[in-house]
Image (tube, rainbow, N blue to C red):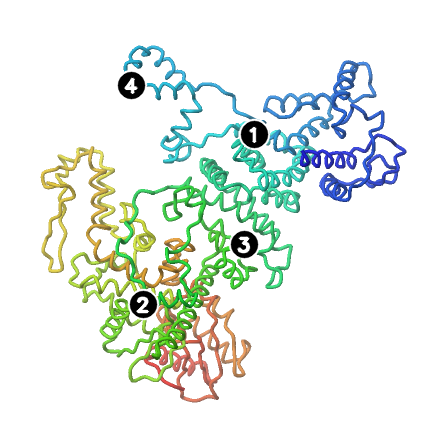
C-alpha cells in the first residue's frame, strides 16, 4: 500500500509540473499553472517529480476547471468518469473542449488495433495529444505493458487437425491407457506447448534442441506498431518520457517484490521495450536507456535465460540491433567521462548494467547460431594429483580457491550450453568487443574484483566477450603471476616448518645438445612427485652459459624444445605439407608420458607468457576446450580426406554400385604397411549406400580425429591441464583465442613496431642512425624480419595484439665500431652502436641476426 501511495503522489507531482492545476493565478512555484513557472521537458519533469516527492513539497488542489478533465489527479476518477461522459456527449456542440482529449483515459493496455484506431482519430483532427497521453500512460506502467499486445488465443491449423482427429478416433483412444495424457495436451494448447518446449523444434531461423520459446506478447504486432509510430517525433518523445518513468518502478519491482516469480508475463515489459529500434539514439543514452538497463539487470536467472532463448529465435539483423543498442550506451558513457584508476569504469552503474544486458544478447547469439552440443570430450576420470603441500596450505590458511576448476557463468549453466558449442554464431563474436571500454579498463583492479567475487564490485572479466584478446591476456598474466608469488610464499613457509631449503622456482638446468632428455626427464619427475611445482615461475639455465633468465632464456628454451618435439624424424607428430600443420601420430612408438610432457610444455608456455612456434589445426584447441572433432574439422586438419568425403556426400549417383566402398578403412603405419579398421562391427561386409553414407562420414571423422589418437591426446590434454587446471583460461578464451595465446600473431606489422619503439642512451626517433635502422628493417624480407624478431625478443612471432603491443627499446651502445649489435631478449632491448654508414649498419645487423645463438654476460 505504501508503494502504491508513493507512486500515486509522484504521478500527481509529474502532472502538476507538466499540465498544472488549472488555476491561472496559482502561487505554487512547482506548478505548471503558476505565472512564473518555467516550462521543462518531460525528462526533467520526471526527475523533478521525484525530488518534490522526497522533499514532501506542496501539491495543488485541482481547480474546478480541471476536475474530471485530466489524469493528473487520479483520486477524482469517480467524478471524472461522469464528467468525461458528459464531455463526450457534448463534444460535437462545444468547440472549446478538445473533442478526443479524454476519450481513452480509461484505456489501461494497448493492442495493435487500438493503436491504429487512436492514430486514425488523431489523424482526422491533426491532434496527436490523445495518442501521446495513452502511450505515456501505458508505456510508463509495467502492469499496463504486461497486458498489452497479447497474442490472440486461437488454434493453429495443426492443432485443429489434431483435435478433429482426436474426436474421430475417440473410441480407439479410450482403449489405450497411455492416451489420457496425450489427449489432455491436445485439448490444452498451453500445456502441450509447455510439455514440448524442451524437445520440440521449429521452422524459424534455427532448429534448436530447446524448441521455440512461447511468450504471451505478439512480437510482430509490437514491431508493426513501432514502425508506424516512431516516424512521428512527438510520439517518439512519448516513448522516451514513459521509459524514464517506467524504469525505476520496474527496478523496484524486481529488486524487492519478486514480480517475475509471481507472473512470468512480467518479461513482456522487456520484450516490448527492446523492440524500440530507436533505443540507441542519443536522446535515450543520457537517462532512459541506462535506467532501463539497470532494471533489466535485476531480472532473475530463469528470466534472463528465457529472454536469451527468445532472442536466439530472432535473425542476425535483430541480434545486431540489440548489440548496437547496448554497445552505443557503453561507448557513449565511456567517451563522455574520464575514467582512470581513481574513477573506475567498473563503478559506473550504466556501463555495468549495459554489459550485463549485453551478456543476454551474447548467449542468444550463441544459441541462435550453429550449435554442436553432442560431441563433447569425456572428462579425465583420473584426477590430477594434489601436491603434498596442500595440507600445509590449509593449515596456513592458504587453501586453494578453485579446487574444482575454473568458474562457469551461471547463465551458461542455466541455458545448458557453452560458447565452445557454437560453430558459427548469428553474428561474429568480434562485434561484442568494445574497444573504448578496453582502453579505459584498469585491468589490475578488475582482476582483483574478479577474484574477490563480491556483489558490490563488478568485474568485466565475468563478461569476457566484451574484452579483446590483449585485455584478457593481461588478466591471465595477473592470475599467473599471483599464483607464482603464492607458490613462492608457500614454499618459504613450508621451508620454515620442514627445516629444509626448497627452491621457490621451477628451475630447469639443461644442456643445449640434450635439451629434450634433460627437460622432459626433469619435468616428468616434478609431475609425478609434486605437480604444484609446475605452477612456480620457470627459471631456465643452459649449462656452460652465463645468461640469467629474466624471461629471454625461457623463450629460447621453449623454441628449442618445440623444434625438437615436432621434428618428424622423432615420429610423435605427422606433418602435412599442404597445410603446414602437425597432427598426432596414431602409430607413434612414444609412450603416453611423452605426450603428457608435451602438454606440460604448452601449459608452461602460457603460464610463463611465452609464445611457441607450434602449428596445430584448430580442432586441437577445440579438443582442449572439451569438444570432440567432427567431420567439419577435417577441412582444417585433413583437407584431402575432407574433400573426398564431401564429394561422397554430394554424389548424385548410386554410391554402392559406383564406388564399392565398405565400412572398413585402411591406414598406414610408420613403416608404410596398411592397417585395416572397421568403423562398424563387421565393417568389411557392410557396403556404403546413399542411405548410410552420412553415418560412414561421421564414423570416419570420429576415428581420424578422436579414436585413433585417443591415448595420445588424452595424455597431452592431461599434461596441459596439470599447469592450467586452476587458471581462468577456459572461462576467458575461445578456441581460436587459445591458439593466438600460444602461437602469437602471424601478422608482422613492423610499422606498428616502429611507432611504439622507445629509445635510450642518447638516441631518439629523429637520429640519422635510427632513420637508417628502420629503413633497413623495412627493406628486409619476411624471413629476415622473423630472424630480427628472434634476435631481439627471443621469438619470431608477434604477441597477442600484434607488434604494436611489443615494447621494444633501442639503446645506444657506443660510437662507431666493428662490434655487432647485441640484445637483451628478456627485456626486448636492442643495443646498437652508432655506425657511420647505412651500409655498415645493414651488414652488421644481418650478421648478428643470422648467426645469433647462445647467451653471455655483457
Q: Earlier in the sequence, mark 4 or mark 2?
A: 4
Please say if the residues under marks 4 and 1 sit with CB atoms less than 8 Å apart: no
Quadrant in the rendering for residue 583: bottom left
Q: CA distance from mark 4 to mark 1?
A: 44 Å
The residue drawn where x is 42% and y is 39% is: 368
Q: CA distance from mark 4 to mark 2?
A: 61 Å
Indicate the secondary structure of the residue bearing disc 2: loop
From what the image shows, is residue 776 above or below residue 401?
below
- Residue at the spot of label 3: 458
Please say if the residues under marks 4 and 3 sit with CB atoms less than 8 Å apart: no
Indicate the secondary structure of the residue bearing disc 4: loop
Q: Earlier in the sequence, mark 1 or mark 3?
A: 1
Q: Earlier in the sequence, mark 4 or mark 3?
A: 4
Q: CA distance from mark 3 to mark 2?
A: 35 Å
Quadrant in the rendering for residue 288: top right
Label annotation for residue 388: 2
- Foreground mark, 1 or 3, reads 3
The residue drawn where x is 23% and y is 50% is: 706
- Foreground mark, 3 or 2, reads 2
Q: Position of residue 515 (x, y in %)?
A: 25, 75
Q: Residues within 10 Å of mark 3 (few under 14, many from 20)?
A: many
- Residue at the spot of label 4: 177
Q: Earlier in the sequence, mark 4 or mark 1?
A: 4
- Residue at the spot of label 1: 222
From what the image shows, is residue 278 above or below residue 715?
above
- Foreground mark, 4 or 1, reads 4
Q: CA distance from mark 4 to mark 3?
A: 55 Å
Q: Residues within 10 Å of mark 2 (few under 14, many from 20)?
A: few
**Which corner quadrant holds the N terminus?**
top right
Q: Earlier in the sequence, mark 3 or mark 2?
A: 2
Indicate the secondary structure of the residue bearing disc 1: helix
Amino acid at each position: 500500500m505504501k508503494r502504491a501511495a508513493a507512486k500515486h503522489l509522484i504521478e500527481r507531482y509529474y502532472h502538476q509540473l507538466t499540465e498544472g492545476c488549472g488555476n491561472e493565478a496559482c502561487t505554487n512555484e512547482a506548478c505548471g499553472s503558476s505565472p512564473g513557472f518555467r516550462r521543462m521537458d518531460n525528462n526533467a519533469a520526471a526527475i523533478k517529480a521525484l525530488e518534490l516527492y522526497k522533499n514532501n513539497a506542496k501539491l495543488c488542489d485541482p481547480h474546478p476547471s480541471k476536475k474530471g478533465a485530466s489524469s493528473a489527479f487520479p483520486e477524482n476518477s469517480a467524478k471524472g468518469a461522469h464528467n468525461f461522459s458528459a464531455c463526450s456527449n457534448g463534444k460535437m456542440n462545444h468547440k472549446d473542449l478538445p473533442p478526443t482529449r479524454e476519450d481513452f483515459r480509461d484505456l489501461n493496455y494497448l493492442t495493435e488495433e487500438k493503436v491504429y484506431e487512436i492514430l486514425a482519430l488523431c489523424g482526422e483532427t491533426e491532434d496527436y495529444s490523445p495518442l501521446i497521453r495513452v502511450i505515456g500512460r501505458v508505456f510508463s506502467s509495467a502492469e499496463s505493458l504486461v497486458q498489452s499486445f497479447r497474442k490472440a488465443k486461437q488454434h493453429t491449423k495443426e492443432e485443429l487437425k489434431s483435435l478433429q482427429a482426436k474426436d474421430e478416433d475417440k473410441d480407439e483412444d479410450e482403449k489405450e491407457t497411455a492416451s489420457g495424457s496425450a489427449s489432455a495436451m491436445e485439448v490444452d494448447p498451453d500445456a502441450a506447448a509447455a510439455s514440448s518446449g524442451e524437445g520440440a523444434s521449429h521452422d524459424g531461423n534455427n532448429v534448436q534442441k530447446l524448441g521455440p520459446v512461447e511468450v504471451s506478447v505478439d512480437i510482430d504486432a509490437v514491431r508493426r506498431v513501432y514502425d508506424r509510430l516512431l516516424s512521428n517525433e512527438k510520439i517518439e518523445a512519448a516513448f522516451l518520457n514513459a521509459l524514464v518513468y517506467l524504469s525505476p518502478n520496474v527496478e523496484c519491482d524486481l529488486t524487492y517484490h519478486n514480480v517475475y516469480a509471481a507472473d512470468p508475463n512480467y518479461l513482456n515489459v522487456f520484450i516490448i521495450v527492446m523492440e524500440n529500434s530507436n533505443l540507441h539514439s542519443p536522446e535515450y543514452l543520457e537517462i532512459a536507456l541506462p535506467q532501463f538497463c539497470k532494471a533489466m539487470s535485476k531480472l532473475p536467472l530463469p528470466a534472463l535465460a528465457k529472454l536469451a532463448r527468445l532472442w536466439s529465435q530472432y535473425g542476425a539483423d535483430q541480434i545486431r540491433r540489440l548489440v548496437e543498442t547496448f554497445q552505443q550506451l557503453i561507448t557513449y558513457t565511456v567517451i563522455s567521462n574520464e575514467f582512470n584508476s581513481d574513477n573506475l569504469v567498473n563503478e559506473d552503474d550504466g556501463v555495468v548494467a549495459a554489459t550485463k544486458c549485453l551478456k543476454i544478447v551474447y548467449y542468444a547469439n550463441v544459441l541462435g547460431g550453429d550449435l554442436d552440443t553432442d560431441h563433447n570430450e569425456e572428462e579425465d576420470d583420473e584426477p590430477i594429483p594434489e601436491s603434498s603441500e596442500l595440507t600445509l596450505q590449509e593449515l596456513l590458511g592458504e587453501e586453494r580457491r578453485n579446487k574444482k576448476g575454473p568458474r562457469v557463468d551461471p547463465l551458461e549453466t542455466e541455458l545448458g550450453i557453452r560458447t565452445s558449442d557454437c560453430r558459427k554464431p548469428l553474428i561474429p563474436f568480434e562485434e561484442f568487443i568494445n574497444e573504448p571500454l578496453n582502453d579505459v579498463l584498469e585491468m589490475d583492479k578488475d582482476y582483483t574484483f574478479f577474484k574477490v567475487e563480491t556483489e558490490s564490485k563488478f568485474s568485466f572479466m565475468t563478461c569476457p566477450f566484451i574484452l579483446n584478446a590483449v585485455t584478457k591476456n593481461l588478466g591471465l598474466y595477473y592470475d599467473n603471476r599471483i599464483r607464482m608469488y603464492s607458490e613462492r610464499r608457500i614454499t618459504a613457509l613450508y621451508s620454515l616448518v620442514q627445516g629444509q631449503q626448497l627452491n621457490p622456482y621451477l628451475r630447469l638446468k639443461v644442456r643445449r645438445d640434450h635439451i629434450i632428455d634433460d627437460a622432459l626427464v626433469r619435468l616428468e619427475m616434478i609431475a609425478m612427485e609434486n605437480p604444484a611445482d609446475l605452477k612456480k615461475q620457470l627459471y631456465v639455465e643452459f649449462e656452460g652459459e652465463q645468461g640469467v633468465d629474466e624471461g629471454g632464456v625461457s623463450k629460447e628454451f621453449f623454441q628449442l624444445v618445440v623444434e625438437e618435439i615436432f621434428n618428424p624424424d622423432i615420429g610423435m607428430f605427422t606433418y602435412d605439407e599442404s597445410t603446414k600443420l602437425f597432427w598426432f601420430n596414431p602409430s607413434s612408438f612414444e609412450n603416453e608420458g611423452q605426450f603428457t610432457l608435451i602438454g606440460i610444455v604448452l601449459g608452461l608456455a602460457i603460464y610463463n607468457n611465452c609464445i611457441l612456434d607450434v602449428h596445430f589445426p584448430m580442432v586441437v584447441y577445440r579438443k582442449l576446450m572439451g569438444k570432440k572433432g567432427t567431420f567439419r574439422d577435417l577441412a582444417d586438419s585433413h583437407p584431402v580426406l575432407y574433400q573426398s568425403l564431401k564429394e561422397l556426400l554430394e554424389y548424385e549417383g548410386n554410391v554402392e554400385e559406383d564406388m564399392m566402398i565398405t565400412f572398413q578403412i585402411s591406414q598406414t603405419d610408420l613403416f608404410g604397411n596398411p592397417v585395416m579398421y572397421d568403423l562398424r562391427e563387421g565393417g568389411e561386409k557392410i557396403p556404403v549406400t546413399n542411405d548410410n553414407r552420412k553415418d560412414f562420414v561421421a564414423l570416419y571423422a570420429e576415428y581420424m580425429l578422436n579414436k585413433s589418437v585417443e591415448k595420445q591426446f588424452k595424455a597431452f590434454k592431461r599434461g596441459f591441464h596439470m599447469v592450467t587446471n586452476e587458471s581462468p583460461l577456459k572461462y576467458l578464451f575461445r578456441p581460436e583465442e587459445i591458439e593466438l595465446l600460444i602461437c602469437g600473431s602471424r601478422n608482422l606489422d613492423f610499422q606498428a613496431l616502429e611507432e611504439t619503439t622507445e629509445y635510450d642512451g642518447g638516441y631518439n626517433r629523429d637520429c640519422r642512425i635510427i632513420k637508417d635502422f628502420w629503413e633497413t628493417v623495412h627493406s628486409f624480407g619476411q624471413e629476415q624480419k622473423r630472424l630480427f624478431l628472434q634476435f631481439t625478443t627471443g621469438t619470431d612471432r608477434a604477441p597477442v595484439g600484434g607488434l604494436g603491443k611489443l615494447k621494444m627499446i633501442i639503446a645506444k651502445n657506443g660510437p662507431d665500431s666493428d662490434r655487432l649489435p647485441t640484445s637483451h631478449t628478456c627485456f626486448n632491448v636492442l643495443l646498437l652502436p652508432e655506425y657511420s654508414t647505412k651500409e655498415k649498419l645493414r651488414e652488421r645487423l644481418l650478421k648478428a641476426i643470422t648467426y645469433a645463438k647462445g647467451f653471455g654476460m655483457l
